[in-house]
Amino acid sequence: MTKLPSEAFLLRIFIGESDKIDGRPLCEVIVEEARKQGMAGATALRGFLGFGANSRIHTSKVLRLSDDLPVVVEIVDEEGTINAFLPELDKLIGEGLITIEKVRVIAYRHNPNI
């Protein structure tokens, strides 16, 4: 199991649900690539409302059903590991937003029986 220091970094990637790479959802490709790189963990979250650089609203409201809802992929790891992942991420992301912030890790545990 990877051990995280109490001071780590949070990488956030804001993309659209319809973003694809070779026909696969971009969020899935990013999470799988983070796993291959041995990163501590990644989570993809699907939003129900948002807009990006083009200011077009994407919503899950029934009357304005969007096929491109916002997706945020969050990855927490050490600064060096995050920085090493950025060039790979740059190759994958065509349109979106990437942010990094310092976070305090309170607990990072796993079930040893899995």
Image (tube, grey):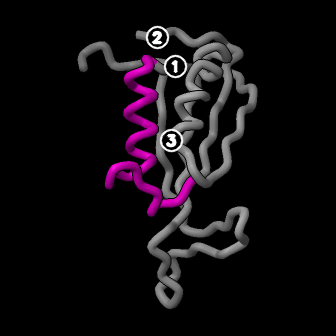
Q: Residue furthest bottom?
A: 63
Kindly identify the amino acid type of the residue bearing the numbered disc 1.
Answer: Tyr
Of tags 3 and 1, the one toward the viewer is: 3
Q: Tell me: 21 left or right of 85.
A: left
Kindly identify the amino acid type of the residue bearing the numbered disc 2.
Answer: Thr
Q: Tell me: 4 left or right of 55.
A: left
Disc 3 marks which residue? 92
Residue shown at 47% from the left, 86% from the top? 62
Q: Is residue 40 above or below residue 50?
A: above
How many numbered dots are placed on residues in this image? Answer: 3
Residue shown at 32% from the left, 55% from the top? 23
Disc 2 marks which residue? 2
Assign a secondary structure to mark 3: helix
Q: Tell me: 42 left or right of 23.
A: right
Q: In this view, does 21 lie above or below 31?
A: below
Q: Are marks 2 and 1 in contact (CB under 8 Å)?
A: yes
